[in-house]
Amino acid sequence: MKSKNVLLIFNKKIMYKPLIYRLAKDFDVVFNVLEAKILPKLEGRLILELRGEEDSVDSSIDYLMQEGVVVETLVDRIVRDDERCIHCGACTSVCRVDALCIDRSTMKVMFDHEKCVACGMCKIACPVGAMSGASIDLD
Amino acid sequence: MIGVEIKKSYEEINSKIREGKAVVVTAEEMPKIVESEGIDGAFRKVDVVTTGTFGTMCSSGAFINIGHTRPRMKASKIWLNNVEAYGGIGAVDCYIGATQVQENDPLNMVHPGTFKYGGGHVIEDLIARKKIRLRAAGYGTDCYPLREFESTITIDDLRNAIMFNPRNSYQNYNCAVNMSEKTIYTYMGILKPDMANASYSSAGQLSPLLNDPYYWTIGAGTRIFLCGAAGSVAWHGTQHAPECKRGRNGIPAEGGGTLAVVGNMKEMDPRFVRGASFTGYGCSIMIGIGIPIPILNRDLAFYTGRSDRDLVCPVVDYGIDYPSGTGTPLGEVSYAELKSGLIEFKGRTVETAPLSSYPMAREIANTLKDWIMRGFTIGVPQSALPTVPRGKNDETR
Ligand code: SF4
Ligand code: SF4
């Protein structure tokens, strides 16, 4: 079994096309919607956790890409500029999945991108612009 | 200072510093020393305690002299990277304020605005020796005929760049919550409705003025660490309030004192300053300050020996009370609780997040300790900050 978080960007031509249900039906991939945002007449963005055999997950992603969906794998997508981060902790209050949290012994802010679901909230909360990358919100 | 008991003099401490024999510890290390050796023991042992803070300090800015142009110009309006600096002073002097936003910033037109670049960023970029676009306009006089000027400069092209912050280093500060029903975007960060989170911004036990609660050793002339350079305290800061609420140990339990500080920007280190953007609120700057406290008497050993357990701050509602300027604090919490990540408050468990950087505050206190061990002497305050007499019943045991 493998689990992968992906950001899917649907342009306006395909944003109302029923594609997602086929992941389960044809590829035997379990999906979990982590975030979704629709910008009417522009595009739709969806963050999914895909779970299944490695081959199935990969071929389901190939399928989505053939249909014109832009697929971004999220591990390593949201990044922190470690030179810029001053470990204030402001981002920790908005990160719901604890990808950003404080090590209480040092009070430093740890970033675990494996846990990140690219909601983009830390980009809004960080006062010094240390967080960047593809997220559910348009940049 | 008048009325302050001096059992170990500035001269004595400074000559020890010059000889490299002074015992210097940080305000984070001091509580352990007081615990193990007692207050009297700690007083005898320790000469100086260093403090530090690194956080958003809106009342900050810099006086900049751009140098005379040829022909000369009386620059009445000046922009640095399209952020206006106040030009209503001498011909080529101006003051760039940290919260000034770039011209044509959309502000909060689409709420919450992002406030990407402002005066604080200009100051950071100058200190980082980045190129800055300078633009000036004047109306022309007989002695200053030039009306327009544009150039790309770095801090090294400026005649002077002097940071002068009218209100920094708040003695203590609020813990913010939101009792309203919608998410709010404040200078205390993003606050979720119905008290779902709490934010705080003081460095607690490392915070400079919490370690000298009655300002016995800090006054105009005190030499400090300011954004990586040696600066000094210029005066008391705006909104300085020594008559604030104090705890049984005499230490402020709310805002309290503030400092006006000054330093040469050309000597500062970009590591210890950051332009800041608070979504929905505006631009600002994060400033790093460290202040040495000479341990002149045993009471100062007591104060610097307090830890986060002994320091409290008020919990204030930023949903309704703060913006309307009404209401009273909802209660008090200690910095030890705040730093644990969770507070028990009004029967609820609330997640906390800091806004000022404790790791940076620690680094500043350690850097200042290092400076002093290598000969940075203690500045004797030349005029005292306004203060109040120590409470008769203050516990200092
Ligand atoms: S984008 Fe930021 S806030 Fe959202 S999950 Fe990732 S780290 Fe947390
Ligand atoms: S808010 Fe920004 S600077 Fe502060 S800890 Fe998070 S990433 Fe670092």
Image (cartoon, coloured by chain):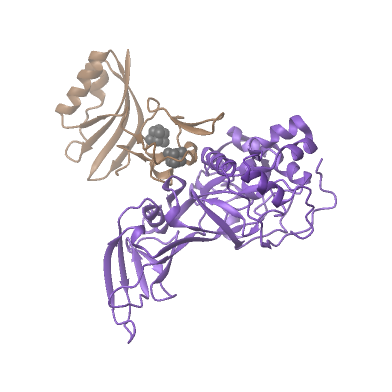
Chain colours: A brown, B purple
Relative height, residue B55 to residue B154 (above, below)? above
> Which residue is at the front of the view, B244 or B72?
B72
- The outermost residue toward the bottom is B142
| Ligand 1 position by quadrant | top left
> Which residue is at the front of the view, B199 or B211?
B211
The residue shown at (30%, 33%) is A46
The answer to whether any part of residue A91 appears in the image is no
> Which residue is at the front of the view, B19 or B263?
B19
Quadrant location, the N terminus of chain A = top left
Name the spot of residue A3 as percent of width and height, x first.
33, 19
Relative height, residue A80 to residue B153 (above, below)? above
Name the spot of residue B90 as percent of width and height, x first.
43, 75
Quadrant location, the C terminus of chain A = top left
Please tell me in which quadrant of the rendered image residue A117 appears. Answer: top left
Please tell me in which quadrant of the rendered image residue A65 appears. Answer: top left
Asked whether, in this view, residue B255 is left or right of residue B355, the answer is right
- The outermost residue toward the left is A66
Name the spot of residue B215 as percent of width and height, x first.
70, 55
Name the spot of residue B292 as percent of width and height, x first.
62, 47
The residue shown at (44%, 56%) is B265
The residue shown at (80%, 43%) is B396
> Which residue is at the front of the view, A71 or B68?
B68
Q: How many marks?
A: 0
The answer to whether any part of residue B18 appears in the image is yes
- The outermost residue toward the front is B19
Relative height, residue B163 to residue B45 (above, below)? below
